[in-house]
Amino acid sequence: MVTKNPYDKHVFKVPSLRLNSLQTHFFHDGSQNDLSDAIRVMAKYQLGRAIPGQDIQSIRAFLTSLVGQHPELTSPYEAE
């Protein structure tokens, strides 16, 4: 609807999962403040069932692994 291009139909931009495990609140309304609880809620709504605690831990470990290493950024304008 936005681009009016038929090739864009059913294409959605979704947020990256890369830094998800560093967030302190989850969902559009911030209703969950724990990643494991957010995973549990998403399993219920997307899969229609509860998932075992070990699966929640595995998903949490995967999401945490996406963070990776970040180089320290410095400003070129800092005085030497």
Image: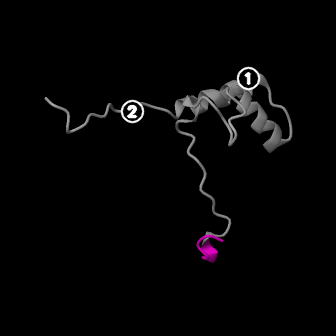
- Give the secondary structure at mark 1: helix
Residue displayed at 66% across by 71% down: 1
Give the amino acid at mark 1. Gln
Of residues 57 and 10, the one drawn nearer to the viewer in this rendering: 10
Q: What is the count of numbered marks?
A: 2
Give the amino acid at mark 2. His
- Give the secondary structure at mark 2: loop
Quadrant for residue 77, please give it.
Answer: top left
Disc number at residue 70? 2
Q: Which residue is mark 1?
A: 54
Q: Position of residue 7 (x, y in %)?
A: 61, 73
Quadrant for residue 51, please give it.
Answer: top right
Instruction: Judge depth for marks 2 and 1 and give the one in front.
Output: 2
Magenta part of the chain: 1-7
Residue displayed at 73% across by 23% down: 54
Q: Position of residue 9 (x, y in %)?
A: 66, 70
Principal SS element in the magenta part?
Answer: loop
Compared to residue 42, the image places residue 5 above or below, namely below
Question: What colour scheme governs how the chains and residues are painted in the rendered image of this protein?
Answer: one colour
Q: Is residue 14 left or right of 39 when viewed as pictured?
A: left
Residue displayed at 82% across by 37% down: 44
